[in-house]
Image (cartoon, rainbow, N blue to C red):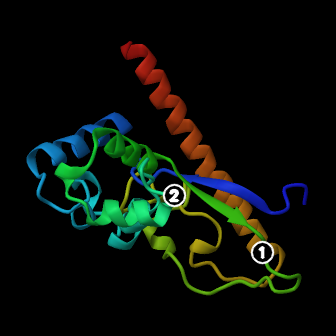
Amino acid sequence: AASKYRGTLALDLCCDVRQEDLEEELLLMKRFSGKKRVGACPPQSLATHLPKRLWHYVLARQQQPAAAEKSAAGAQMVDALYGECKDAALRRLACSLKRLEVPVSGKGPFKEEFVTAGGVDLREVDLATMESKAVRGLYFAGEILNVDGVTGGFNFQNAWTSGYLSGRDVAARTAAAAEEDQQQS
């Protein structure tokens, strides 16, 4: 409770794309598709798996130096043409897509915790790593999975175990990628 149930969740919305490549793609959109609206045309590398509402949310969170508040800046970015965007704003957008920081605060009142039914079908998940079979690099843990059991220990165990398995695989992949990068240098 020392944190008072506050923190920041950092999300990588495009884990298969390097930030430098995303920046380059956005700058190319500006150069070759300058008359397209940013809100209507996410980069091709994201278009197939980033929902439009999430794309607009990320755009709404962008700050432009002249804007007094985030919502005004976001509205400008959603409605702006790629050609109107400054390179620095597009680089910040790429950074946000690679590390979207979302504030987390609070918790429900005691005894209000409950388990919901439904979620991602376990047949769509590699149960050894908790990675999606359909989208490489996408992991599931806890209540996002379609696992139902007696409330209490079973559901906690599912959350802890699936979190451990997915975290272990992400850590192993990250270490392997870092080692590969080091060997190529």
- Residue 146 position, x and y percent, is 57, 78
Residue type pointed to by label 2: Tyr
- Tally of marks: 2
Relative to residue 20, is residue 90 depicted above or below?
Answer: below
Quadrant of the frame with the N terminus: bottom right
Residue at image coords 51%, 72%: 122
Read off the residue under disc 2: 139
Q: Secondary structure at mark 2?
A: loop
Residue at image coords 56%, 85%: 118
Q: CA distance from mark 2 to mark 1?
A: 20 Å
Q: Nearer the viewer, residue 87 or 180?
A: 87
Left or right: 164 in relation to 136: right
The quadrant holding residue 133 is bottom left
Dot 1 crowding, Cα within 10 Å, few <14, some 14–19, many 20+: few
Dot 2 crowding, Cα within 10 Å, few <14, some 14–19, many 20+: many
Q: Secondary structure at mark 1?
A: helix
Q: Are marks 2 and 1 in contact (CB under 8 Å)?
A: no
Read off the residue under disc 1: 154
- Residue 93 position, x and y percent, is 38, 48
The quadrant holding residue 23 is top left
Q: Is residue 92 visible?
A: yes
Left or right: 63 in relation to 46: right
Q: Nearer the viewer, residue 73 or 9?
A: 73
Q: Nearer the viewer, residue 157 or 2?
A: 2
- Residue 184 position, x and y percent, is 36, 15
Residue at image coords 11%, 57%: 35
Residue at image coords 35%, 45%: 89
Residue type pointed to by label 1: Phe
Closer mark to the observer between disc 2 and disc 1: 2
Relative to residue 8, is residue 180 depicted above or below?
Answer: above
Quadrant of the frame with the C terminus: top left
